[in-house]
Amino acid sequence: MLTAKEEKYVQGLVAGLSQRQSYLKAYPNSDKWKPETVDNKASALYRKSEVLARFHELMGEHKAKALWTREEAVKDLIWVKEQARKSIVNEKFDDGYIRQGTSGAYISAIQELNKLEDLYPSNKTDLNVNAPIKITLGDYDDDD
């Protein structure tokens, strides 16, 4: 069983605070200590089996909620996409025109589903190199 301060520390970690920030929030008197001392105490507290078990328990609950939310978002987006598709198929317009709002809803639902499924390439590229790199910028004179 955790003390109230230990629980507050764990709650801070689950909320995304660092060990130091969580410790300072749970143990306000520690703000007078050196940062290294706070870090050491926070680290020792985190390693306590009861604290670590509670942290993993809360993170598991947090992950389960996040998965449920994602699953519900996908279901809703699929519903919107299907309703828009049905509306497009059933619309009878001259010259084959489709209402902009309906087509926009359909396209937006598809785009959001693709984002959730990570089908779009990332704009960010991570590059890890384990070798020396030689960069040649070209020939130029110092007089230019």
Image: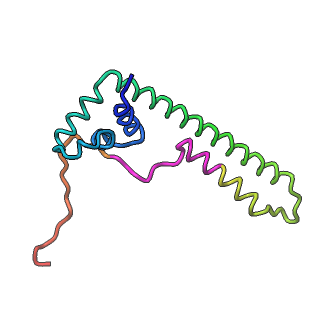
Residue situated furthest bottom in the rendering: 144
Foreground: 4 or 90?
Answer: 4
Between 111 and 144, the residue placed more toward the observer is 111
Q: x and y percent of residue 137 in the render? A: 21, 62
Q: Quadrant of residue 7?
A: top left
Q: Name the residue at 36% across, 28% down.
A: 3
> Residue 62 location, x and y as percent?
49, 34
**Residue depicted at 82% across the width and 52% down the height:** 87
* Residue 114 part of the magenta segment: yes
Q: Residue furthest left?
A: 142
> Quick one: quadrant of the C terminus?
bottom left
Q: Which residues are magenta?
A: 110-126
Q: Which quadrant of the figure contains the N terminus?
A: top left
With respect to residue 44, does 31 lie above or below?
A: below
Question: Which colour style is shown?
Answer: rainbow
Q: What residue is rendered at 74% in x and 61% in y?
A: 101
Q: Residue 66 is drawn in which quadrant? A: top right
Q: Which residue is painted at 24% across and 29% down in the image?
A: 44
Residue 39 lies, with reference to residue 45, above or below; the image says below
Question: Is 72 displayed left or right of 94 in the figure?
Answer: left
Vertical arrangement, residue 45 with respect to residue 16, above or below: above
- Residue 92 lies left or right of residue 116; in this view the side is right
Where is residue 5 shown, x and y percent of the image?
34, 34
Where's residue 68, x and y in %? 59, 35
Q: How many marks?
A: 0
Q: Is residue 120 magenta?
A: yes
